[in-house]
């Protein structure tokens, strides 16, 4: 690590502590050349592959921005959004995988958003689960009613994968809604 003051190419670690609820390490360093001290923060990187193929670092702010749109007009605070973004990051980090498709991040948001606000959950789910008709909404609402407040635990651990489970559940719900219409 280069010294930010004299640009000496080396530094000595004086103290290390965990920070950000264990997601990063704060290191206090000293330059052997000029003797000045400085602090660095180290985190394991998470990257997101966007639909365009561009790879970029995971951003809690982008999670909050996307969810904020679904929460417009709902009783959800900025603090609620920050906690949701932190939980999403923790859940994707816990998978042990460092690179995710943007769609997988969207699917990882769903169980946490459902706990926060069911209307915002439906808005967000309609995009990430590609609702095509009112029957899709009916099926999602029926699922919310069948498992009030407890679905988040059922969906924990589904943050990584191809989305096949979500697609099967979505198709099953749509088929059930169509059958009830007949």
Image: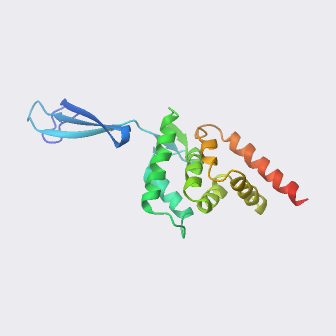
Q: Looking at the picture, tell me which residue is in the foreground, 92 or 148.
A: 148
The residue most toward the left is: 34
Is residue 52 visible to the viewer in this orientation of the structure?
A: no
Most extreme residue toward the right, as rendered?
182
Left or right: where 15 falls relative to 52: left
Q: Is residue 165 visible?
A: yes
Query: Residue 42, percent across and down?
Result: 32, 37
Position of 86 compared to 146: left or right? left
Q: Tell which of 102 and 73 is nearer to you.
A: 73
Residue 71 quadrant: bottom right
Q: Position of residue 1 (x, y in %)?
A: 23, 33
Quarter residue 164 falls in: top right
Coordinates of residue 65 in the picture (x, y in percent):
48, 59
At 62% from the left and 37% from the top, the residue drawn is 161
Counting the numbered discs, the total is 0
Question: What residue appears at the point 45 percent right and 48 percent down from the top-left corner?
Answer: 86
**Residue 177 in the figure: left or right of residue 60:** right
Image coordinates of residue 122 in percent, x first then y, are 64, 59
Q: Quadrant of residue 166?
A: top right
* Left or right: residue 15 compared with residue 144: left
């Amino acid at each position: 690590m280069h010294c930010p003051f004299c640009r000496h190419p080396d530094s000595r670690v004086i103290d290390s502590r965990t920070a950000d609820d264990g997601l990063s390490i704060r290191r206090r360093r000293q330059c052997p050349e000029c003797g000045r001290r400085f602090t660095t923060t180290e985190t394991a990187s998470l990257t997101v592959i966007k639909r365009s193929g561009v790879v970029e670092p995971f951003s809690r702010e982008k999670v909050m921005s996307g969810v904020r749109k679904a929460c417009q007009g709902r009783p959800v605070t900025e603090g609620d959004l920050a906690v949701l973004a932190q939980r999403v990051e923790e859940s994707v980090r816990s998978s042990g995988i460092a690179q995710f498709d943007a769609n997988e991040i969207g699917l990882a948001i769903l169980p946490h958003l459902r706990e926060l606000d069911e209307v915002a959950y439906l808005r967000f789910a309609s995009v990430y689960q590609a609702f095509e008709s009112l029957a899709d909404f009916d099926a999602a609402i029926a699922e919310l009613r069948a498992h009030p407040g407890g679905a988040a635990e059922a969906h924990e651990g589904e943050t990584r994968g191809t989305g096949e489970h979500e697609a099967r559940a979505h198709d099953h719900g749509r088929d059930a809604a169509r059958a009830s219409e007949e």
